Amino acid sequence: MNALNPFPGYPVATIAGHLDWTATTEEISQARNIADEFVGKWRSGSLAAQIKPLEGEEALPSASGSPSDDAAVIQISGDYGTGKTHALLEIDKTLREGFMGRRVQRLHILRVVGVETGPSGWYQNSIGPVLNDLGGRSPDGGWFARLAVDLYAEAARAFLPEPDDLTNPGMAFQLVRSGILNESSVDHVYEELITKACESVSENVRSQLISLLDPRRRADAEQWLSGNSASMAGVDSVGFAEFRDGDAIDVLRLAASLSRRVGAPFAILIDEIELFLRVDDRSGKEANTTWLKRLLSELAKVGAFVAVSGHRSTWDRRADFLQRFSMGKRIQMRRLIGDDVLKIVAQRVGSNLDVLFDRDQAEAIAEAASGNMRRVLSLCRVLFDQSDGFVKPLKAQDIKDKAAELSQAPKPDQVLLRVQELFEIRNLSIDKDLLRSRTRNFDFDLVARTRAKTYFVVMVRPTPNVKEAQDFVRQFLAQLATAKNRGEHFSAFFICDTPADRDYVARANEPNEIAFNWIDYTDARFINEVAQVVDLQLAVEQEAPGEALSASESARADNIADLESTWNKRLDDIDRRRTAELKDLQDRLSRAVRAAEVSAEAAKWPTEREIPHFSAPELFEEPTLAFRLRLLLRSNLAVVMILMGLGLMLIAFSPEIANVLNPPDSRTYHLARLSFAACGVLAIIGTLSYLLRKFFDIENYFDHASRLIKEYYLAAPHPRLLAGADRVSRELILRYGPKKALEELEDRLQTLMRDARIGL
């Protein structure tokens, strides 16, 4: 077997990683050509020549036309595993090599991944911090502070006879301090540069950019520009306002515009945009989609390079997005065919005369892997070892069998069963609910414990991509941190069908409180990785029996503490229940006393036979005319006046209107005049009909209310009921109108009668 396998063992790229190699397909070549085109036509906006020509070449001219002429906005579309992230990384590499060849001193490339949140949340949690960390930290601050220093140097160049002599931005401050340049003049030009770039930009963003030169306010300004406005709430300044969605677009647009002004190309590479747009798919709104469209348009205006990668289905649901991308700048990552596989193998293996790899084998690999780049590379790696570097012949059926073997990953429940069997063989205590009493936020699939109280916690999840796997890991670690007690040792196993993100695992293990393991169960050797971690921990416990005994005593003490805590909680629950029961008893006694008092008063009321037959006016005070008109015109006075006025105007001015549209001697003049007059009459009739219908509704309400009040008063002839019923009926019609008030009236009167009976 060839020990040096040229195919990657981990064929999954992340936008934050680096590019080892890329299979040169047509799509990758297209991405390189687009990046080279951007490098070739990019023009500096600086007074100094930032692009130095090579020998025999002419200097590239500074920006004179519209920056949008130099912009490139690219869409990359494809299924999972087709190489979209590789295309972005190849663009990054091509831009760096191209501008390095053109002697560009600075290049700003922002690489971010989509996040399932709103625009400001995405900027605050991902884009802003990554942008401010471009190039690392310096004594002056982050990226925003360095941009301000470069812009100040650009302002100083405006007063120098040879602007390109000022190569070090720090020299601008020395020239100002020594008095060679006037400080107020340079400051004025600096603010003018920002103000000119900040046209149609919020005042918050402009003020923060200007504040970057103030050492006392620089750190706060950088935090705000990075999206971290939460810690600025107590600062007495208008600039430290809440960071909004529009501010994120303004900051990115200005970052690109000012970078161009100081002679630095600016590029944004966005991967997995489907996560960001998925929020719109779930909510049924277009907030994130609209924000992204605006961002692309604004970045194109200032000459930036933008590449957005997303799943094919995301773009298919948003066909109008194509208008936001540069003409001819769409890269469709297609599925590989036999010729592509043949080129990939030739790239990786080289011109080895002993290699027996032909088109038939390449087509068999492409078919078995369904043209998926990730599966093709994984299959080639296995076949390379199996055939001793493609020296031994491979049959098409062997290739299909190996592909089927790789694709037949175990199901999550089977994985969990195998891990449980491993724990049982090693005599570990197994209980899924072992940590349940410590936290309610519990989502573990399996928990095992050694005698020395070392916990092995397992979570098994199917994950379609690295991003979702990372989301599960964050939740898993948060739950572990809640469940873990001081002095305990936790080994966590996150087992999924996505290869481990090594950088993410390293960051997760930095606190050194929980040993975290990310294991891919599609690898047939996954159970060996679990066994290795478990056996290593058991061996450590056996080598330190004193520590194990101490841990056992600690475990016993913790168990006693848990029992005491549980018993105290039960006692507290009993006390709370008894207090609630006593309070309920007191309430019932109070109500009984009040009911007895009301009954004694009710005994003095006349019986039903002694009550005369009252008419409606005697029980219900008739509303005045003013009150009826108030109800009739309530919230409709403006509409009534407009419609009545419009009708009268159409009747009065129908000859003039008809004369404008038709000559007086034409046949249609009289017809048009009658038509406009008829429209005016209809408007008046319609308005009067509406008022009449509403008047009938009001009369119907008062008639019904009078009957209801009469019935309830005869049932409980209490003075307070009569007065309250009249008040309630008027409040309801004023609040809801006659129709809805009619529905609410009976319920309110029943409540009023019940209160009158029990004295509430």
Image (cartoon, rainbow, N blue to C red):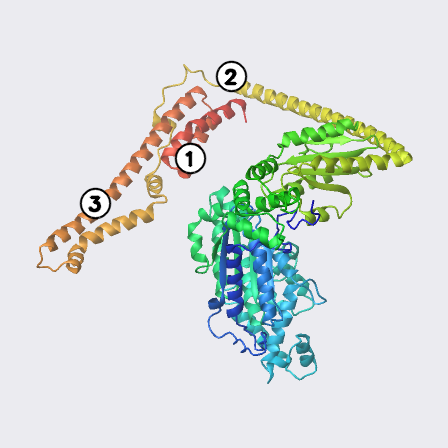
Relative to 73, residue 612 above or below: above
Image quadrant holding the N terminus, namely top right
Residue at left offset 19%, top offset 46%: 681
Q: Residues within 10 Å of mark 3 (few under 14, many from 20)?
A: some
Residue at left offset 50%, top offset 24%: 754
Q: Position of residue 521 (x, y in %)?
A: 66, 37
> Which residue in the protein does label 2 denote?
603
* Left or right: 724 in relation to 247: left
Residue 398, image quadrant: top right
> Which residue in the protein does label 1 denote?
732
Which secondary structure lies at badge 3? helix
Q: Position of residue 680 (x, y in %)?
A: 20, 49
Relative to 594, residue 501 above or below: below
**Residue 605 in view in this figure:** yes
| Residue lying farthest to the front in this orientation | 353
Q: CA distance from mark 2 to mark 3?
A: 62 Å
> Which residue in the protein does label 3 denote?
682
N-terminal of the pair, mark 2 or mark 3, is 2
Which secondary structure lies at badge 2? loop
Which secondary structure lies at badge 1? helix
Q: Are marks 2 and 1 in contact (CB under 8 Å)?
A: no
Residue at left offset 66%, top offset 74%: 169
Q: Position of residue 606 (x, y in %)?
A: 45, 17
Residue type, label 3:
Leu
Q: Residues within 10 Å of mark 1 (few under 14, many from 20)?
A: some
